[in-house]
Image (cartoon, rainbow, N blue to C red):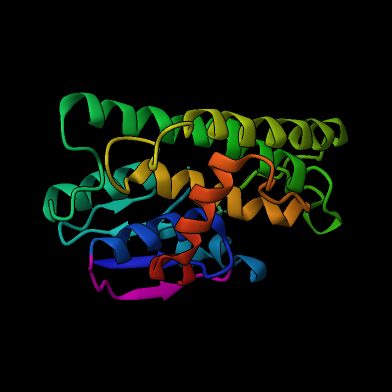
Amino acid sequence: MQFYDCATAPSPRRARIFIAEKGLDVPTTQVDVGKAEQLGDDFLKINPRGTVPVLMTDEGVALTENLAIAAYLEAKHPEPVLMGNSDIERAEVLQWAAIAESHGFQAVAEALRNTNPHMKGRALPGPDNYDQIPELGERGLTRTKRYFEILDRRLEGREWLVGGGLTYADITAFVCADFARIIKMRVPEELGNLHGWYTKMKERPSAGL
Ligand SMILES: N[C@@H](CCC(=O)N[C@@H](CS)C(=O)NCC(=O)O)C(=O)O
């Protein structure tokens, strides 16, 4: 296997944490998004959509979505279980990861990519250039605040988003909550359920990678 990572970007961080929590050691190549290496000819041969992470499997298949990477590694290396312990848990892990992506990642990305002067013409990831829409920046900030509230409510009376331990849903939700600092939004201390979970996640060795 070969893992294509970018140390500064949130999506590859999700896969990096997942790999670490599985206890795996996967050979890694850094792709510097800051230098647009993801849009170079060499990398576009690996992922024509020009995004990281990518996990090149031993079968020679390029997995270019976190969900696919997690599903593959869970099947190949079932322990520790990170995708749910039962039918209902597996469904809820996917549900909460999807909620984190659509209400969290999309919101933070909207706020960042539609306002940052360095991202002019780069409002969406990938090889196609899209103009910024400043109104989406404002909306992204409002939606990020709402994302924190959604997580806080879910975590009422629970230690983890799903079941009795860390899952792919927690990893996804945590990486997004942490990345919100880029738009100057921090997990609010007054949202006690969320803040406690976030602090616990941040203390895990995998969060430091
Ligand atoms: N849906 C993908 C998202 C991948 C993605 O958007 N990655 C960003 C880094 S966070 C990227 O490669 N950006 C390249 C660009 O901005 O051109 C996943 O969840 O794995």
Confirm whether the magenta stretch covers residue 40.
Answer: no
Query: 85 above or below 165?
Result: above
Counting the numbered discs, the total is 0
Residue 126 in sight here: no
Residue 42 on image: x %, y %: 46, 67
Q: Position of residue 61 (x, y in %)?
A: 24, 52
Q: Residue at x 46, y 66 (%)?
A: 203
Q: Is residue 156 visible?
A: yes
Q: Quadrant of the C terminus?
A: bottom left
Residue appearing at x 12%, y 53% in the figure: 76
Q: Which residues are magenta?
A: 23-32
Compared across the picture, whether 140 is left or right of 198 comes to right
118 sits to left or right of 129: right
Residue 99 position, x and y percent, is 49, 29
The picture quadrant where one finds residue 59 is: bottom left
| Lateral position of residue 128 relative to residue 140, left or right | left
Q: Main secondary structure of the magenta part?
A: loop
Q: Nearer the viewer, residue 201 or 174?
A: 201
Choose between 35 and 42: the one closer to the eye. 35
- Locate the N terminus by quadrant: bottom left
In the rendered image, residue 137, in percent from the top left (x then y), is placed at 81, 38
Residue 51 vs 98, above or below: the answer is below
Q: Does residue 180 lie above or below 162 as drawn?
A: below
From this view, report whether residue 113 is shown above or below residue 110: below
What residue do we see at 75% from left, 48% from top? Answer: 112
